[in-house]
Every structure is written in structure tokens, then in C-alpha cells.
Image (tube, rainbow, N blue to C red):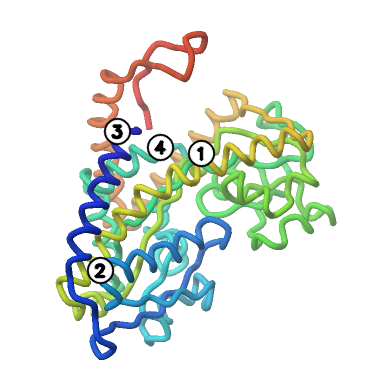
Amino acid sequence: MSSRIRAALGGVALTYCIFAAAPAATQDDVVHWRMNSLLYPKLFGEAGERFAEIVRRLSGGSFVIEVHDRLVLDQDTFDALEAGLVDAAWGSAGHHGREDSALTIFTGFPFGPDPAGFTAWMQIGGGAEALQAIYDRHGMKSLYCGILPAEGGGWFLAPIESVDDLGGLSIRSFGYGARVLQRLGVVPYELPAQEIRQAFETGLIDAAEFSLPSIDADLGIAEVAKHLYFPGWQQPVTSLEILMPERRWEVLSDRHQAVIEAACGDMLSWTAPAAVEKQIEALQQFRQMGVEFHQWPDDVLVEMREAWEDIIAEDVEGDPLLAGAWSDYLDFRERYGDWQSRSSTGWTGSARHASKPQPLKD
């Protein structure tokens, strides 16, 4: 991984050198965009600010993106882009699942690949093309601009030892994760970030899954729920994108299109390691607060996976584009897994914990 990161950063450094040679823009030449960030400000949101700064620097000041934190809500994004209220949106495809449910898998999905596998699917396995085919029916253009590691698996007031313990629990959840839990007897609640802690305190919910541990820490969830489960089966990755109307992309000069593409490359190099560092810090903080870390029982994970496979099988029947995207992913997963199982050393950080390589299922 470190060699890939260094290679990516080296490419970004070369890009900086190339674009830096361009003359500074006059005021009349400057393109101004308003970009709506749909993401939580303490990590996801700051990524949008970083992206805008890279675009400004690479363009020599001829392309300026003004970032607004949740100027419009997820469900209003398409309308805001179409009306010209904003020029672009920084977020993830799953934010637009209400407009088109087929977009949801492109944020990350239950029992899916890790960041390296998801990025490989998007960049060389046909994922980006499959996503764009879905966005084409809405006149939108998407560029893959970042990847974050797995979320936590959920915060609970009491330990979970079997599927029976989930039955009847009220859990803050979202998207495919919520649908899987519902099939196991959970009552899902879709709550915004700032209401999760209060929902615990008032007894509205018994558990919650929201985001990365570092973001959960900022919300104060660990102060009211002391049992944190891993892995985050419901979302092993979170992908980031910049989304804009297709017509907005087409009127950009070739150079400004290249600037955006280069900035996305930089964000892919930065987001994963930056996010991992924050999770290390968050887990240490949780330990000091007395949080107990748990692994999901194997039998619970088996039932969750079976529920997920039933759900995605039902969804692909109703949407040919989703069916095509999912079929392409399964084909890529098989080929990628074949390579991973043969190339992996099974090393986990120390000789004491080394294990035999296992075939990659997802």
C-alpha cells in the first residue's frame, strides 16, 4: 500500500509541476463555481475544502470553487444542480439514493470490498462506467474523488450475542444496512447526526450505526453507548465524488477538466491514509472512556450476509442498469479475488498473528 501511495503522490507532484508552468489568470479568465458539500464537516467536509484548494492551485487561480456546507440537503441536490443554484456537489453517490436507488451501491455496500478493492473496481473494473451510465439518465457527470475506510459496526447499550438479541431493537441506521437489519427484526430509525446522542438519552433508540469511529466520537455517542461492534459490515468503504450537470462539465476547457481530474487523483491519495490516522486516534480515545470493543458473532454475520444477498437480488430485478453494474462487480470480484488470494502473504502486523492466505470473497 505504501508504495502505491508514494507512486500516486509522485504523480500528483508531477501534475503540480506541469500546471504550475501555466500563466496566472486574469480576473476575466477566472471560472467561479459554487459547490455544495453534503458531508460531515470534520473529515468528509474538509476533504471538499482541500479539493477546492487543489483546483485553485493547479489552475493558477483560473478555477475557483467556493464550498458551501450543506447549502441544500441530499434530496434537493439534483434540483439545485439543475436550477443552477450550485454548480457541483461534493459527497457520495448514495446521498442521491432517493432520486435513484441504483446509485446506492456506489457509496459502498454490505459485505463489499475494502478501499483497495473498491478503487480497483471503480478505476479498472468498470465501476466508474457503470455509475456514469446511471447518472446519464439524470444528465449528471460524476468523478471518483476519494475513498474512506470501513465504518464502525454499530453502538449498543448492551452486548449482542445472537440474532435473537437484535429482534425488536430500535436502531439508528441508513440505506442498505437498515434494510438488512430490518429483516433480522430490527426497527430502523433514520436520524441526522446531531440527533443520535439525544435519541439514546431519551430511549428512542437502543443502538446506532452512523459513520467512521472518528466521526462517531465527535458526536459524543461513546458517552452514552459503551459497546462498539466490528467489522462495519454495512459499509466497508465510503466513496467520495464530485457531481455536476453534464452540461457544466462540457463547457469547461480541456485544461480545467484536466485540473479537476488531477485534483481527484490527489484526493484519492490523501483520503484513505488521512482517515485511517483519525480512526487510530478515535479507538485510543474510546479505550480511555471505557468503551468495550466486540466482534460480531459469526452466526450473526452469516444471517446478515444472507439477508443482504436476498435484498440485492430483489433490487437488480427491477433495474437493468443496476443489474448490469452488479453483474460487472461480481465478475470483477471473482477476478480480483483470484489475484488477491494468490498474492497475499496473510501478514497482519506481527509473526504471532500471521495467518494463512484466505480466498477473497468480497
Which residue is the site of mark 4? 114
Which residue is the site of mark 1? 307
Density class for disc 2 (Cα within 10 Å; few <14, some 14-19, many ≥20) is some
Residue type of the residue flagged with mark 4: Asp
Q: Residue at 17%, 71% (x, y): give it.
A: 22
246 shown above or below 90: below
Q: Residue at 42%, 60% (x, y): give it.
A: 101
**Nearest-to-viewer mark from 3 and 2:** 3
Q: Position of residue 336 (x, y in %)?
A: 26, 31
Q: Are marks 3 and 2 in contact (CB under 8 Å)?
A: no
* The quadrant where residue 346 appears: top left
Give the mark nearer the N terminus: 3 vs 2. 3
Q: Nearer the viewer, residue 77 or 317?
A: 77
Residue type of the residue flagged with mark 1: Ala
Give the mark nearer the N terminus: 2 vs 4. 4
Q: Position of residue 314 (x, y in %)?
A: 41, 48
**Nearest-to-viewer mark from 2 and 4:** 4
Q: Residue at 43%, 44% (x, y): give it.
A: 272
Which residue is the site of mark 2? 136
Which residue is the site of mark 3? 3
Q: Position of residue 289 (x, y in %)?
A: 78, 38
Q: Nearer the viewer, residue 41 or 327?
A: 41
**Nearest-to-viewer mark from 1 and 4:** 4
Give the mark nearer the N terminus: 1 vs 4. 4
**Nearest-to-viewer mark from 4 and 3:** 3
**Nearest-to-viewer mark from 3 and 1:** 3
How far apart marks 4 and 3 lie (CA) works out to: 18 Å
